[in-house]
Amino acid sequence: PVKSKKSVLDLIAYIFLAFVVIRIITALLSEYPETSSQLFYKDALFFLSFFAFSFYLKVFDEKKVKLILNAFVIAGVVVAAIGLTLFITQKVSRAQSFTTGYSTFSSYLLIVFSFGVIYFRNLTGKKEKTLWLLGLVLILAGIITSLGRTNIVIAAAVFIAAIFISKVQLKYVLVVIVLTAGVSYLAFNINSSEVKQRIEEPARLSDRDILLNAAEELFFEFEHPLFGYGPRTFHEVFTDRDKLADKGVGSWHNDFIQVYFESGAVGLLSFLLLILFPIAAAFKLIRKKGLKNERLYILLGAVIAETALVLSALTAGFVNSPVLAVLFAFLIAIVSSVVYPVDKQPEAN
C-alpha cells in the first residue's frame, strides 16, 4: 500500500471531467430526451473508467503496471486469434470477434498493435520478444482480414514509425512482414468472397459519401450549434436512410461530426481538448529528456495508440462505442500516469 503526496487528479482528469459534464448537460437539454437518456447507462463505464485507470496506474508499482500493460496486449492477441479463426472457418466474411462487428474489432486491434509495437522496445528476453512478435503478427493479420482500409493504412504507418521510434532491428521487422503476409495470404485463400468484391469495386465508399452529404446539408440547417441535438440522436436527425445500402448504420462514421451534432460547438471543443492536450503534454515531457527508457516507451506507445484511434475515428468512431471509448480512457490514463506521476511512499506501520 502507498500514500501519495499529491492527488491522482490532474489537468487531464479535469479536462476529462469537463467533457463528461458537457455531455451530461447536452443530454439534459436534448431535443430527444428519451434517446439521449441512454448516455447515463451506456456511457457510465466510459465516464468512470478513466478515473479508476488513472488512480491504479499511478499508485501501483512498476511491476504491477507492467503486468497490466502486458495483459492489455495479450488480450488483443486472443481477440485477434478469435477473429482470424472465425474468418478462416468462413463463419464471417470479414474478421471480427464474437461480440463486436468488424469495425470495432479492427479499431480495437489497431489500438493494441500501435501500443504493442512501440512497447516492444522495453522487452529484454529473447523468448519474450519472440512471443510478442508472434502476437503482433496475429493482431496485424486480424486488422488486414477485417478489411478496414483506413485501419490497414494507419497500422502500416504506425509500423513504419515504430521501426524508427523504437529502433526495431531489421530481423524483427522482416519476421513481422513475412509472417503477417503468410497468415493473411492463407486466410484470404480460404475465405475470399469479400476481398474479391473489394477488388471488383475498389471505389466503393461503404455509404460514407451519403453520410457526409447528409452531414453537410444538416450543418447549414443546424438549429442547435451550441449544445447540439443531444447524445445518441443520429437516428432522429439523419434523414437519408433510404439511400443507404447498409440500413443498420447507427452513426456518422466520424466522431468529430458525431460529437458536433450531438453536443454542439461546446462539446466538440471539449472533445478536441481531451484528445489534443494529453498528446501535447506527453511531447512536452519527452522534449525535456528526463524519462527513463521504460517509461518513455510506455508514454510513446500510449500517444501513438491514441493518435491511431483518433485517425481511425475520421472514418469510424469510438466515442459511443462501449469498447473503444473505454480503451481511449485507458490510453489517456496511461499518459496521465506518466506525465503527472504521484510521489509514492510506503505507509507507516
Image (cartoon, rainbow, N blue to C red):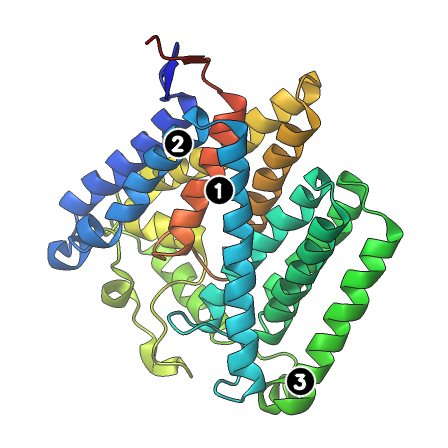
Question: Mark 3: which secondary structure?
Answer: helix
Q: Quadrant of residue 201?
A: bottom right
Q: CA distance from mark 2 to mark 3?
A: 42 Å
Of residue 31 and residue 75, the one placed in the foreground of this image is 75
Quadrant showing the C terminus: top left
Q: In this rendering, does residue 283 appear at all? A: yes
Q: CA distance from mark 1 to mark 2?
A: 10 Å
Q: Quadrant of residue 142?
A: bottom right
| Residue at the spot 58% in from the left edge and 79% down from the top edge | 204
| Label annotation for residue 68 | 1
Disc 1 to disc 2: CB gap under 8 Å: yes
Q: Nearer the viewer, mark 2 or mark 3?
A: 2
Residue on which the image places disc 3: 188
| Residue at the spot 29% in from the left edge and 41% down from the top edge | 47
Number of other residues with Cα within 10 Å of mark 1, as a class: few under 14, some 14 to 19, many 20 or more? some
Q: Give coordinates of residue 92: x percent, y percent.
A: 49, 84
Residue on which the image places disc 2: 56
> Three-letter amino acid code at disc 1?
Ile
Sequence-first disc among 3 and 1: 1
Outermost left residue? 34
Question: Mark 1: which secondary structure?
Answer: helix
> Three-letter amino acid code at disc 3?
Phe
Number of other residues with Cα within 10 Å of mark 3, as a class: few under 14, some 14 to 19, many 20 or more? some
